[in-house]
Image (cartoon, grey):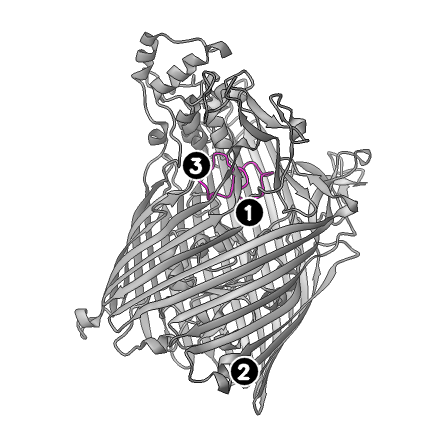
Amino acid sequence: MNVKLHVLSAGALFFLGQAAYAQKSKNDSILKENKIDEVIVTGYQKKKADEITQAQAVVSGDAIRRTSPTTSIGNSLQGKASGVYVQSATGQPGSAATIMVRGVAGVGGSSEPTYVVNGMYMTARQFSAINPADVESISVLKDAAATAQYGARGANGVVVVTTKAGKVGKTNYSFESKFGFSEKLKDKNFTMMNSRELMNYQNELGYLGVAPRSQDEINALAVYDHNWQKDLLRPSSIQSYLFSAQGGSRESTFYYSLGYDSDNGILRDIDGLKRYTGNFGFTNKLSEKLNVGVNLGVQYQVTENFRDRNNTQNPFAAMYKYAPYEPIYNPDGSYNQKMRAGSNTVEQIRNNRAEDQRLRIPVTLFGEYKIMDGLKFKTNFNGLYDWYMGTTWMKKGSNLDLTTNKIPTGSLAKNTFYGFNYTWNNSLNYKKSFGKHNFDFLGFIEYNDNFTETANASAYGLKSTTLSVPSITTPSDRNTFTGTKIRNTLFSLAGMVNYDYEGKYLATGSLRRDASSRFGANNKSGIFWSASAAWNIAKEDFMKGGFINDLKLRASYGTTGNDGSLSDYYNVANVGFDLYGNNAALFPGTYNSTEKVYIVGNQNLKWESNAVTNAGVDFTMWKRRIRGSVEVYQNKRKDFVQLVPLDKQEGSYYQYINAGDMTQKGLEAELSVDVMRKKDFQWTVRANISFQKSTLDKLADGQTERNLGYTYLKVGESPYAFYNVRFAGVNSANGNAQYYDKDGKITETYSASNAVPITDKTPFPKSFGGFGTTLQYKGFDFSADFTFKLGGYTYNNMYLLANDPTQAKAGRNMAQSAANMWRKPGDTDVLQRVDSNGLRDSDQWIEKSDYLRLRALTLGYTFDKKILGDDSPINKLRMYVMGQNLFTVTSFHGEPEISVGSAESTSLFVPGSYNLYTYPAVRTIMVGMQLEF
């Protein structure tokens, strides 16, 4: 990664992969903005841009605020940096994004990177709750030279977040606000039928047993025609406020902020998300040798949820499945419960509520003591308290209550957890120069402890129809209570050394030993290391005076580990008890509710490791107007962890094992050009692209293939190839669907046994990236950012169901394309002839999910002192309008980006591989104000 391209702070011009904008003061110059001595966070250390030998991308806080939805920070990285693949998990307010650094990280485990916020480890959900306006910068560490310092946490890449801190100088106050709305994106490349279209289509299915309707019946029902999407959805209302103050003196600095964000979402009767945030940071120089500091954050949010599953309890499924002539209400005003697709989702939403509350309190305490010149000791404590309460309430007498119980009972469920994650790091840092030789040594001891306790309680037969919380008196006839306690630890010893000669020749090395409680008793510890070198060629005498301003060659090799691919306690045998706690005995496996299987412990489970080779070149030229970088890399992942079934003779159990090896190769490129760079007019264009390929090298126990259900593993091929029967088209003579058998011969007889791995189709794209432009003319600023994905595939289950005639037979709505079916000999480019089997499961429904999307468009104007006057208490006022997801180009039928098929379909863990009816993507329009005084 061209680290030189990312040296600018929020007050600098756009750099590659960024969309930052700054209104410059009258004394600023373009050359000053393109300086290369800005300090960049590289993990445990900070370095100048020309001292970095590792592959990493940096996105400024200003770029994050300007391109992220108000309530989600993860999507702000989309298209901003090569090698960083980002997809929206869902369109739900506050939803965490799916982020993968340099591709799929393993087979059967998580590909999620490690998130580190001010030195504190966080989950993706915790990271997503950070207020974007509080972020100074995000660094994405990609190669081993960057990630090996995190050892067991570094195999999937590391996202390092630095929040704003105090600065020496006059106190600067700012107030930011945004207002806007979002709406569901239109269905791409298909339209659902209206009432007449559906009933005429159903009449054609008479030979499937559907009773035909007369024209009078069709006319009578068509009166009720309506669009279920309009009935169930609405434009959301978005608002955001943030007040902050930043300043300090030589002895102490401070930064604090208070924020409020809300997005009620596009689903009627559901109040999507409300979030309250606070951030308070202080540093004090107690003496010439001692500095101390504290940073305290508070995040509280409330989310109302829906049932994200494949039936009409999910309103996003119901709006496609309900027939358009079926009304919400009966003539007497009661809910219509006779819809053939399922129960009334409007009644379900109103009478079966779900709410999540989350409170997070992160705190950082540090002290730094200067022992002698060049030698410092630092102790750093990071703690994160995380509390959650989820409440679901089924109203007594509701339709679901009457359906599931013989008599009305109602129910109440409370699911809660609290956790405390803390990291204590003690380090020594020694810097020394001997003439032109410069050394920087860092050694540290780190201990990380994660504790979580859960409690799940439910009650049935509620005494009250309005009770929503337990009371002192018994609230129900039947109560249940379950819970868990989980703890994992990581103890680490690490050392890092940096060397440079005159700033021309640079070398770095790191060594880390981790001991993780998640691994078997025989393999608890792992050792990880890295080495890298760089040559700043532009600093050589023979390069001076040319049009090349900076030219750096970099190379690195190292190893990292991964303890995030498995859950806790699956490295040990489990103890079981009877109902009353008697007769404890060793039990070979325990039931896992997430995986829905019994799992056996494995004391010989080894570390999953990743050996990374990386080479790159960074350059700037033509008075620093052209900036770019090119990277090539190879990752050799060994002993990846996967949950696999044991042999049948061992019982119906699963076990986490070291399942095989995998290789990843890739190329990444970035380029940024200042087309125009005048005092009153600047124009920058930028682009990045990544190519990646993964190959399965080995499977455990000598296997060459492994069937995972709808995806497949095959040695020598890309992992997660789709596994399905191959579709051979429609026989135009008789309308029958044709398929390939295992030998490649065409047959009209469908057999699931003819399924094969389709090795040229996987969910992961072959390339992805982004491009954009920024213009500034006097007080005006304009920016546009596009993202794209090429070469990935998705099993389009939604489109299959929308075209399957057996769904219409069941009374469900259909896509207009369903009517384009074979009717007579010679018909081509049509769906197969209708029969009682409907449309069969085959690769006919595996569609390329390529897309080009206008991710963000912004237009703003800044009023500065020239306009406001030198006596004005306002330093700067910027007004702007911003749009997100304004248009998408794709051949996919539906939404090509959403990575979660269905939140309650936990087996569908490969992002973007299988679509169902989750919260859809949205288009957002906002107006905003940034005020500094």
Few, some or many residues within 10 Å of mark 1 (<14, 14–19, 20+)? many
Dot 2 falls on a residue whose secondary structure is loop
Dot 1 falls on a residue whose secondary structure is loop
Image coords of residue 129 (percent x, y): 46, 53
Task: Give the residue pinned by disc 1.
Answer: 764
Task: Give the residue pinned by disc 2.
Answer: 504
Image coords of residue 830 (percent x, y): 46, 25
Q: CA distance from mark 2 to mark 1?
A: 39 Å
User: Mark 1 belongs to which amino acid?
Assistant: Phe
- Is 403 positioned to the left or the right of 743 in the image? left
Residue 900 in sight here:
yes
Q: Please state which of residues 539 and 543 is positioned toward the viewer in this rendering.
A: 543
Secondary structure, magenta segment, majority class? loop
Q: Quadrant of residue 234?
A: top left
Q: Please state which of residues 219 and 118 is positioned toward the viewer in this rendering.
A: 219
The stretch of residues the image draws in magenta is 893-918
Q: Earlier in the sequence, mark 2 or mark 3?
A: 2
User: Mark 2 belongs to which amino acid?
Assistant: Lys
Residue sitting at x 45%, y 38%? 892
Q: Earlier in the sequence, mark 2 or mark 1?
A: 2
Image coords of residue 322 (percent x, y): 42, 23
Query: What number is the disc on residue 247?
Result: none
Image coords of residue 161 (percent x, y): 49, 63
